[in-house]
Image (cartoon, rainbow, N blue to C red):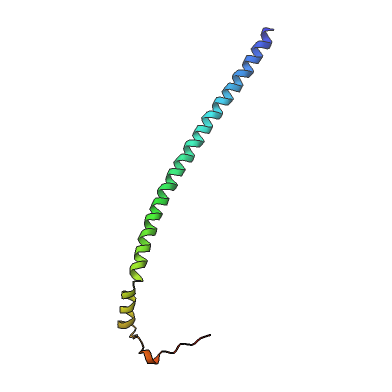
Amino acid sequence: MLGKTFGVLLLLLLVVMASAFQVIYAKHQNRQAFITLQKLKQQQDEMETEWGKLQLEQAAWAAHGRVEKIAGNELEMVIPPAGTVSIIKP
């Protein structure tokens, strides 16, 4: 009887130890995932900041006045007189 009880207690001890190791491993995995999440959030913030800067830059380069100035000065383009414009309908 004593040997049987000892065997059950030993089995329970092993089950408890295995469970404890699983809890430790799960916590470790959770911490690793959280660290990765924080790094990705920081990267996302940096990319959103860069995206905003690029949008501002694109708006500056595509400004109507700038395009018109370049067309006139560098490409020697002019607005055609109203009488020379023909509208073709499909």
- Quadrant of residue 1 in the image? top right
Instruction: Decide which of 3, 24 is in the foreground and name it.
Output: 24
Question: Would residue 44 appear left or right of 78 to someone viewing this image?
Answer: right
Q: Residue drawn at (46%, 40%), measured in percent from left and top?
A: 34
Q: Nearer the viewer, residue 87 or 28?
A: 87
Q: Residue shown at 44%/47% (left/top)?
A: 40
Tell me: residue 81, above or below residue 70.
below
- Residue at 44 percent of width and 90 percent of height: 86
Vertical position of residue 88 compared to residue 21: above or below: below
Q: Return the residue found at the far top.
A: 1
Return the x and y of residue 17 as percentages of the image width and height: 57, 23
Q: Residue 52, located in which quarter of the rendered image?
A: bottom left
Residue at 39% of width from left, 59% of height from top? 51
Where is residue 16 drawn, in percent x and y? 58, 21
**57 or 28: which is nearer to us?**
57
Count of picture labels? 0
Q: Is residue 50 above or below residue 22?
A: below
Task: Point out residue 30 in the picture as x, y percentages from the top left corner.
Answer: 50, 36
